[in-house]
Image (cartoon, rainbow, N blue to C red):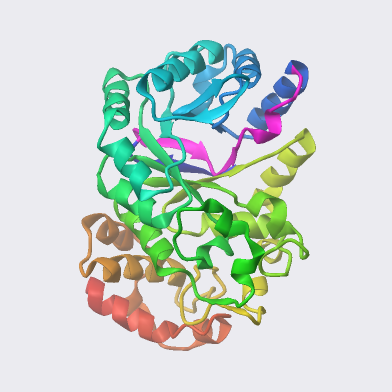
Amino acid sequence: MQYRELKRCDHTKVSEIALGCEGFVGKSRDEFTAMLHRALELGINFIDMYTPNPEFRDNLGAAIAGRRNEIVLQGHICSVWENGQYLRTRDLQKTQDGFEDQLRRIGTDYLDVGMIHYVDSESDFHEVFDGEIITYCRQLKKEGRIHSIGLSSHNPKVARMAVETGLVDVLMFSVNAAYDMQPPGEDCNDLWNLDNYKDGFTNMDPERKALYELCEREDVAIDVMKVFGGGDMLSAKLSPFGVAFNEYQCIEYCLTRPAVAAVMAGCHSIEEIEKIVSYDKASREERDYASVLSRMEKFKFHGNCMYCGHCAPCSVGISVADVNKYLNLSLAQNAVPETVADHYKLLEHHASECISCGSCQRNCPFGVEVIEKMQRAAEVFGY
């Protein structure tokens, strides 16, 4: 298992393969415990808990008893249980009661990430950030009852607004190759509506690309929901692209986006947990999402670095994908942020070492003018 940092959460290290909670809902306590303990054995240490289901919370508390310090818990604020069902609320009293119920049932006195639940519209953003909810979250963080503030969203425009407040440390966002082509919208159902894909798309939506780059610059970690599109990406019949990806390709795509720290996979069995954890041992060919993306007719990713790694190996050892990432981060801001400059400096080889052999350019499935990119990077970074 590989681990990445939640940089604004005291550099807490989380497993890049993490668990969503939907697969645990409805399981008996014994089934729940067996699944969770197997995940821990395999190195998973990051768990999202969007559901306020009391049985889920009770079972989680029983399963992690005595093991709280092994687990990074991401719990949702404003997700409550009312009249036997889930409710998203912005009512402060209900939010407070729901938070206290969460801690009590799980048997902990803090959450590593307190995730403001499901903010997709601009009006909802303003209700949260201009009102009592963000004040409550900041107080919880000050008291140490949450160690970082998160926000979950499907809308890159609203997510960007949240990150730009400077208050959000972790963003939970829906990421996969299909959704990344869609323009922003306030109805998340549009993301999986096949009618929206019938005419095709060209390249990643610029607002989504800008969001990922902003999060990278600001050290806001992204944990991914909908990595498999609710399973649709794994089926040629259901996929918005009309072609199927495997689990490893979906995971690899997400983990190569800027700022992504982890993918939250919804596993329903021990076998499914073992399957996704085996990503770390999968071959390069099994992970290769570019082999699918580059063959599609109606959907074109062209001229933009997708960080897929097909440019490797460089004849002089340059990590071309990393150089392109840092270049894009700088060009987006018309400046070289200090953190980006530091990351670039730490690379073993730099763009100025490029000998223009063209190997990377010939290998690129997306037609990126890699030699020009290396020359531009050498100008921007100075070496």
Q: Is residue 16 above or below residue 69?
A: below
Residue 86 lies, in percent from the top left, at 58, 28
Answer whether residue 276 is visible to the viewer in this image.
yes
The residue drawn where x is 31% and y is 76% is 377
Residue 235 lies, in percent from the top left, at 76, 60
Q: Looking at the image, which is closer to me, 26 or 88?
A: 88
Q: Is residue 181 above or below residue 146?
A: below
Residue 80 lies, in percent from the top left, at 51, 24
Quarter of the picture containing the C terminus is bottom left
The residue drawn where x is 49% and y is 67% is 307
Give the residues in magenta. Answer: 9-28
Answer whether residue 228 is visible to the viewer in this image.
no
Q: Is residue 20 magenta?
A: yes
Q: Is residue 294 above or below residue 49?
A: below
Residue 292 lies, in percent from the top left, at 67, 72
How many marks overall?
Answer: 0
Quarter of the picture containing the N terminus is top right
The residue drawn where x is 30% and y is 81% is 376
Left or right, 57 with respect to 151, comes to right
Left or right, 156 with respect to 233, comes to left
Q: Looking at the image, which is closer to me, 31 or 82?
A: 82
Q: Looking at the image, which is closer to me, 306 or 283?
A: 306
Q: Is residue 263 magenta?
A: no
